[in-house]
Amino acid sequence: MSLIGALNTSSLAMLSQSQGMQTVSTNIANVNTTAYKREDTLFQTLLYAQRGNAIASERVAVKPVDRREVMGQGYILATGRADDLAVNGTGFFMVTSSFNQATGKSETMFTRDGSLTQKYVDTGNGVQESFYQAGSGQYLLGWKANDDGTFSTDPTGAGLVPVRSNSLDEIDGTATTEALLAGNVDARTAIGGNASLQGTVYDQSWTAQSLNYVWTKTGANNWSLDFQVSGGTVDTPIAGGTPVVFNGNGQLQTPSTVAVGVTWDDGTSSTVNIDLTEMQQYADTTQVRRTTQNGNESGRLYDESFDKNGVLWGSYTNGRNRPLYKLGMANFVAPNSLEAVSGNLFRATEEAGKMTVKDLETDGNGTSIEVGSLESSNVDMADEFTKMMIVQKAYSMASTNFRTVDEMMELTASLKR
């Protein structure tokens, strides 16, 4: 190797080690950055490189190559904040810079920073709506629930929209169609004696109405059951009651259910199937132990929360819960080849391979969302300081070599004189 070649090799070595030191410094600076993925600087040997007819100056030199450990899992740290989500496993949250996907101008990007916030934006005509944003300020993407509570997911990511907070959402009530009465009628009741147990049902206007179960004893272990409702008239069973039979041990024999038809005062009608299987006849006080029914009044959303499958659930004042959105988790063949963008964002590249979007509820493959937690950076401080010492030593040796070659060139020049 000529002195010029040795000088060039030394200078390239110093530049390469300088880049390595920059990488180490960046990693250390981001040790507390949520979901930051460390970068490693590797070194590639160059025997020579030819440009046209000329031999390039990198002959017998080194070239730095950066590689980011995108899928290196960071520690999951609990924050206790409901809108903090951590990915435990593979995959990325999908985000976009615009809440209006219809424009077609917003690029879909990827992140593992799940420190979510809710932001109100003007969606047009002065209408303010709240959207979930990731830590990078980008809008979080998910599938919106269908009216029946199901989701139309797609592995290509089709149908994803910015996740909106339904803070002013209301949900319709439902009329009661099924009810259960669990309790006891006193076996000591005299024949002809009666007792009344009370429950609640909802009419077609989602208004709570009282339902009275009138029990009349007709014989040993035999009763007649009539029904009365407020705000309406019982059509079936007809007056005279439904025969109910218990065995000698106080357990119900027949019937297990009774269909009660009601005409409400507003002209609407309902049929309520009453489950009596938990009724008993013991020598004890007549009482209701439990009543349930499937109707409810209308309600207003008062809380939203994500679950481990990335489903955003709404809780309503009428006691109902329903799914609102489901997050899609993006996966790549070679995630370490994604392009890093400022703000812990990544951009898809050809080198990263084909993207598939997973529904964690059906295809989680070991991945889950940890609610109330965030993923820490995957920077190992001990490892970074070790690299720093190695890089510093290598830089020092390269600079010493450069200085030595420079002195040799000066000596050679003086010999010519």
Image: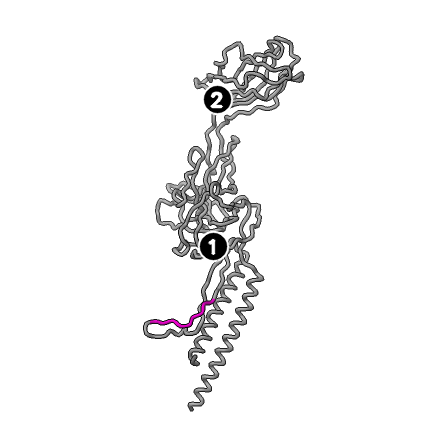
The N terminus lies in which quarter of the figure? bottom left
Residue 144 sits in quarter: top left
Residue 137 falls within the magenta-colored stretch: no
Label 2 vs 1, first from the N-terminus: 2
Residue 351 sits in quarter: bottom left
Query: Which of 141 and 331 lies nearest the eye of the viewer?
Result: 331
The residue under label 1 is 344
Locate residue 415 relative to residue 190 in the image: left or right.
left
Q: Which residues are magenta?
A: 43-51
Up the image or down, 318 lies above or below 64; here it is above
Query: Which of 229 and 19 lies nearest the eye of the viewer?
Result: 19
The C terminus lies in which quarter of the figure? bottom left
Please name the amino acid that badge 1 sits on: Asn
Specify the label residue 313 is tagged with.
Answer: none
The residue under label 2 is 203
Query: Which of 212 and 401 lies nearest the eye of the viewer?
Result: 401
Q: Are marks 2 and 1 in contact (CB under 8 Å)?
A: no
Residue 48 falls within the magenta-colored stretch: yes
**Pointer 1 local density, CA inside 10 Å: few below 14, some 14–19, many at least 20:** some
Please name the amino acid that badge 2 sits on: Asp
Query: Which of 407 and 135 lies nearest the eye of the viewer?
Result: 407
Up the image or down, 138 lies above or below 263; here it is below
Locate residue 191 relative to residue 87 in the image: left or right.
right
Residue at x 54% of width, y 72% of height: 393
Locate residue 104 relative to residue 145 in the image: left or right.
left
Colour mapping = one colour
Residue 312 image position (x, y, % from top left): 48, 40
Q: Secondary structure at mark 2?
A: loop
Q: Secondary structure at mark 1?
A: loop
What secondary structure characterizes most of the magenta part? strand
Residue 113 image position (x, y, % from top left): 49, 51
User: Real-space Cα distance between discs 2 and 1?
Assistant: 53 Å
